[in-house]
Image (cartoon, helix red, strand yellow):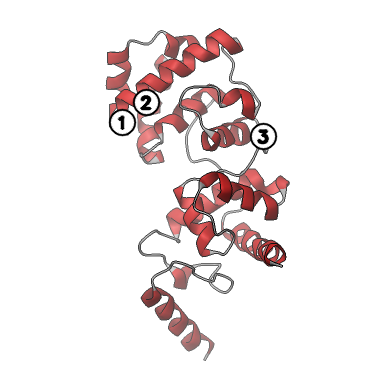
Amino acid sequence: MAGIKRAAQAKKVIAGLKQVYPDATCALNFKTPLDLVVATILSAQCTDERVNMVTKDLFKTYRKAEDYAQAEPGVLEEEIHPTGFFRQKSHSLRGMGQKLVEKFGGTVPKTMEEITQLPGVARKTANVVLGTAYGIPSGVVVDTHVGRVSFRLGLTDEKDPIKIERDLMEVVPQREWIWFGHAMIWHARDTCHARGPRCSACVLQETCPKRGVPAAIATATEGRRRRTKA
């Protein structure tokens, strides 16, 4: 029964998000699958806007996997410094480049099993790259935004990203997986904020159970809704 209710809820959520974000896609700038791998690694604990600022120049210097594999650690760290955690990210980028050169002929692979062998690439990053760069619906992108909004909307009870993705894949049609993850991220950033969700302005307010939303915000939203209907 719970699965049936979630499937019905998912249809409502998809319909609502389609109204506002019909063309939702990754906000990271890239020209090649390799660019997107790099940008996604850099986006950890960093805004997409800042990453795009950094990669604007980075991608002019680093064009192939070999460029990252042979990068001077100190130089690369300085170039990506504004994205934070620059030493760890530099290590991942160099390792990623080396793995691509040594095992995949310098080309970003197109399967989940292969791409997650790259240093710095876990399932979320893999879903971003496979979906956005290759158009392969390998799964649903789940970051902190998607996890939060999925719980509030009643699409999952889980907190682990892998389990959240599993729940979403069960109720969201595969043809929508790529778009859905990005639409949820856009909605989280635009409306369903972590601390101050704009419930009264949300296209999903009629269907959202607001799980985990502070009671004061939910109550204020309901009050405005009743006054509007009156």
Foreground residue, 3 or 215?
Answer: 3
Query: Can residue 223 be seen by looking at this rendering?
Result: yes
In x, y percent, where is residue 182? 55, 47
Spatial separation of the CA atoms under disc 2 and disc 1: 6 Å
Q: Amino acid at mark 2?
A: Lys
**Residue type (three-letter) at the residue carrying disc 3:** Gly
173 above or below 109?
A: below
Give the numbered dot on residue 121: none
Q: Report the Cα–Cα distance between label 2 and label 3.
A: 26 Å
Q: Which residue is mark 3?
A: 135
User: In this figure, which residue is indicated by the disc labeled 2?
Assistant: 89
Residue drawn at point x = 41 percent, y = 8 percent: 70
Q: From the viewer's perspective, is 67 left or right of 135?
A: left
Measured from the top left, where is residue 163 in percent x and y?
57, 48
Dot 2 and dot 3 residues touching (CB under 8 Å): no
- Tell me whether the residue at label 2 lies in contact with that at label 1, contact meaning CB atoms closer than 8 angstroms: yes
Residue 42 vertical position relative to residue 141 in the rendered view, above or below: above
> x, y percentage for residue 28?
47, 36
The residue singled out by tag 1 in the image is 85
